[in-house]
Image (cartoon, rainbow, N blue to C red):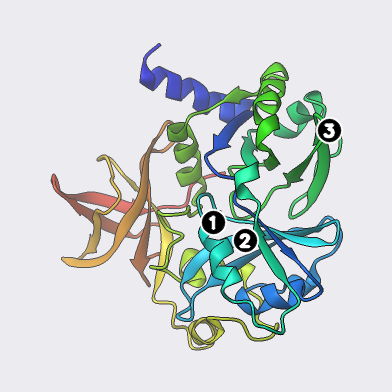
Amino acid sequence: MSHTSNISLEYQQAVDQAVYFRLPSAGLIQIKGDGRIDFIQRQTTNDVSKLSPNAVITTVLTSAAGRILDVLQVFESNGTLLAHTLPTRGESTSKFLSGKIFFMDKVEVADLGPGFAQIEIGGRRAEEMLGQAGFGMLPKEDQFTPASVDSSEVFILGPSRLSTHTRFRLLCPVETAERLAGTLETAGLSEINAQTREILRVESGHPQVDSELTENYTPLELNLDWAISDSKGCYTGQEVIARQTNYDKVTKKLVQLRADHPLAPGSKVRLEEKTIGEITSAADSPKYGQIALGVIRRPYHQPGTKVSILDGDGEYPAEVFLPSS
């Protein structure tokens, strides 16, 4: 089977059935102590004090300049706070948070990432087929459910606006990951490769670590306003984000783009001979053709806006578009 045929098959399985993808890093931080909620409140954008049993709150770790350092999915288990980080960010974020502990803080930070693996589950039949794999109690949106595999605790995170192409995330001990993958295969889920996952992500319009979720942008520029509380206390970067909100200072936005020519990250987006942004991710979609994510200046972010893409091959037409459901 050719590489292209394999991608097409995996893509169709992801659309019609259920698939899984093993990420290279779990990114899991433990925050213990009586001051754990107050501590994470000072560092991130959302109101973590609203955590309830089995709830997951997405919150952004920002720099003093309001730029993105990490995006955390925070939940409580057995009296400790757990923060699921972006892939590859667990170690650096753990060190960063440890450096923010004041001498009066009643809190301890530990990086659990090396001991955990992460498996994403997606597809129309994801819930049904996870049930066939033995997971009877599955979480709803912005919730988590503990489970057991080989007598080891597994955390199942439910759907999130952070990545709608993924229905569930399984965080499991490293030593059980291979057994868990085999259980998923037996239940009928197929493993997809990184290229197929990237197509699904770009189609869904979600930012990713090292492509969009970087210190180049603020959360508002990447449409993460839903992960920002405008009523909680102070946190690092709040003044910058508040100015962007209160004075309409969000000057650029993450958008989806479509063209008839292959697209590539780093290519410039232009309008009327002026550069208005650049492409950050790109994919060849079986459904939409050549598509990309890019961050471009307002007001050119509106769907239907005709632009051009400049790269080493020349300049060719494209448009900002909104995929159909």
Residue 41, can we see it?
A: yes
- Which element type, helix, strand or loop, lies under badge 2? strand
- Camera-near label (2 vs 3) is 3
In the image, 108 versus 161, the foreground residue is: 108
Q: Residue at x 66, y 52 (%)?
A: 160
Image disc number at residue 151: 3
Side of 45 where 204 appears, left or right: left
The residue that mark 2 highlights is: 72
The type of residue carrying mark 3 is Ser
Q: Residue at x 50, y 39 (%)?
A: 200
The residue that mark 1 highlights is: 91
Residue 183 found in image quarter: top right
Work out whether 111 lies above or below 116: below
User: Picture coordinates of residue 95 (x, y %)?
Assistant: 55, 65
The type of residue carrying mark 1 is Glu
- Which element type, helix, strand or loop, lies under badge 1? helix
